[in-house]
Amino acid sequence: MRVGQGYDIHRLVPGRPLMLGGVAVPSESGEEGHSDGDVLLHAVIDALLGAAARGDIGTHFPPDDPQYAGISSRTLLTRVRQMLQADGLAPVHLDCTVILQQPKLRPWVAAIRERLAADLGLPVGHVSVKAKTKEGLDATGQGRAVEAHAVVLVEPLPTPPGPPPGVWT
Ligand code: MG
């Protein structure tokens, strides 16, 4: 059993989509970013990479690399899942918190959970998304940024059936 933790913050700017967990949430401003800026997926990706002890999102997808300009963070998540799979690992439970002053996220939480569950190959009952504000404090509280935290539990993939060790076939 392994655990991984991830965190991310992005500035909010007018005229950009607000992407959270692969869902476009209606908002006057969205994340500034080289990719689509999905702060929640970036935290989830870092949590997955942490559980695999495989560095961080910037190691694998450098923000100054033009091939990642405007890329969907769901594509990056797929690649990271494949990396874990190659290591014989799979996520089994995800818990995250999004910190955003406005808009209120509660109406969108169910859709975000479903999208994350589908993209991670998990039942919705193993994906938790919590929404908080910063009570008007600091840059996030003043609506100038959005933050996300994620914790993921990862387990080894079941070993495929085969001959017991030491048996010649
Ligand atoms: Mg980011």
Image (cartoon, rainbow, N blue to C red):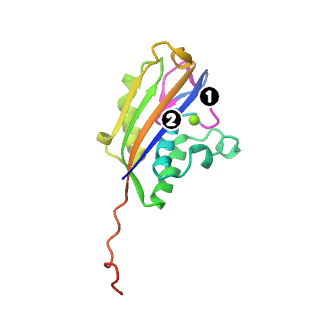
Rendered image quadrant of residue 13: top right
Q: In the image, which disc is placed on residue 7?
A: 2
On whether residue 34 falls in the magenta region, the answer is yes
Distance from the alpha carbon under mark 2 to that under mark 1:
16 Å
- 4 in relation to 33, above or below: below
Residue type marked 2? Tyr
Residue 52, x across and y down, in percent: 47, 52
**Secondary element type, mark 1:** loop
Q: Nearer the viewer, residue 74 or 132?
A: 132
Query: Does 8 appear above or below 126?
Result: above
Please state, as top left, top right, bottom left or bottom right, where the C terminus lies in the image.
Answer: bottom left
Q: Could you tell me the amino acid type at mark 1? A: Glu
Q: Residues within 10 Å of mark 2 (few under 14, many from 20)?
A: many
Residue 30 position (above or below residue 92)? above
Percent from the top left, x then y, of residue 44?
Answer: 47, 40
Q: What percent of the width, then of the height, locates residue 17?
A: 56, 27
Q: Toward which corner of the image does residue 32 lie, by quadrant? A: top right
Residue at x-position 37% and y-position 58%: 156
Q: What is the magenta range?
A: 19-35
